[in-house]
Amino acid sequence: MSNPARPSLALVVAGTRREVSDAELARALVEKDTWAAAEAWHRFAPMVLTTAERALGSKSDAEDLAQEVFVRVLRNVMTLRHPASLRSFVYSITIRTLKSELRYRRVKAWLSFGPTETLAELDHSTPDLEARELLQKFYAMLDRLSARDRLAFVLRRVECMTVEEIAAAMELSPSTVKRSLAHASARLARWIESAPAVAELLDGRLGGRGA
């Protein structure tokens, strides 16, 4: 996913933090003030990285995607009509970028005659090797879903977003989101039946969250 020709946004993380509102930061980004890109990264990168890692199952892939998200933010921030909505603007670009990445992965898998790539660096918060292997199996199941169904499922069951919030983030109708959630849940339930250990792990991690 990474593009060697694209400058790394890791270069902009240094510098003094600014106590400014999101609206002031948005206007500074439009004006290309020298401090604005670094402040945007400091302020929004944790949100982008967390969402991306949960959706992709890989910290390194999430870091690559976060860089792409911020490139798009800087390129399109002048289209933001309401500067105070900068956080929502960054999140919506994150979701669109994730959808594109997941679709690309499915096309790549269909066109590839080689073995499926193994997820590296899966869930560093899980030191137990067996648990990490089970999570890897679960992400392999997610890989079999469509981009829309997978993203809707992750936003609902991992990010704990409401159907209405998911619909707004993914630019879909609530009824479409509900169909995607139902489709994803039904397919995953069938696949997990043959992997009870995965089901037990997910019950511990996702138990009590909305279906």
Image (cartoon, rainbow, N blue to C red):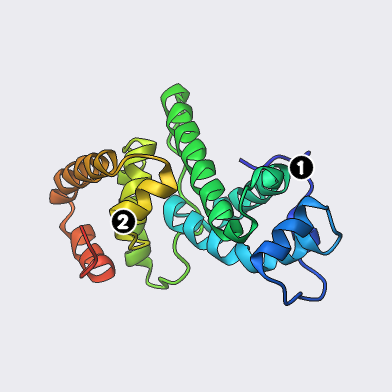
| The quarter of the displayed image where residue 6 is located | top right
Nearer to us in this view, 183 or 63? 183
Measured as percent of width and height from the top left, residue 7 is found at: 79, 47
| Front-most of residues 186 and 141 | 186
Of residues 87 and 41, the one drawn nearer to the viewer in this rendering: 87
Among numbered discs 2 and 1, the one appearing first in the sequence: 1
Who's the residue at 37% across and 63% down the image? 132
Residue in the picture at 44% in, 54% down: 57
Q: Secondary structure at mark 2?
A: helix
| Crowd class of label 1 (few under 14; some 14 to 19; many from 20; radius 10 Å) | few
**Residue beneath disc 2:** 156
| Residue occupying image coordinates x 50% and y 62% | 50
Image position of 165 (left or right of 85) = left
Are the residues flagged by discs 2 and 1 in contact, CB closer than 8 Å? no
In the visual, does 33 lie left or right of 162? right
**Is label 1 in a helix, a strand or a loop?**
loop
Distance from disc 2 to disc 1, alpha carbons, whole Å, reads 32 Å
Q: Amino acid at mark 2?
A: Arg
Q: Quadrant of the C terminus?
A: bottom left
Question: Which x, y percent locates residue 2?
Answer: 66, 43
Question: What is the quadrant of the N terminus in the image?
Answer: top right
Q: Nearer the viewer, residue 82 or 104?
A: 82
The residue carrying mark 1 is 6
Amino acid type at image mark 1:
Arg
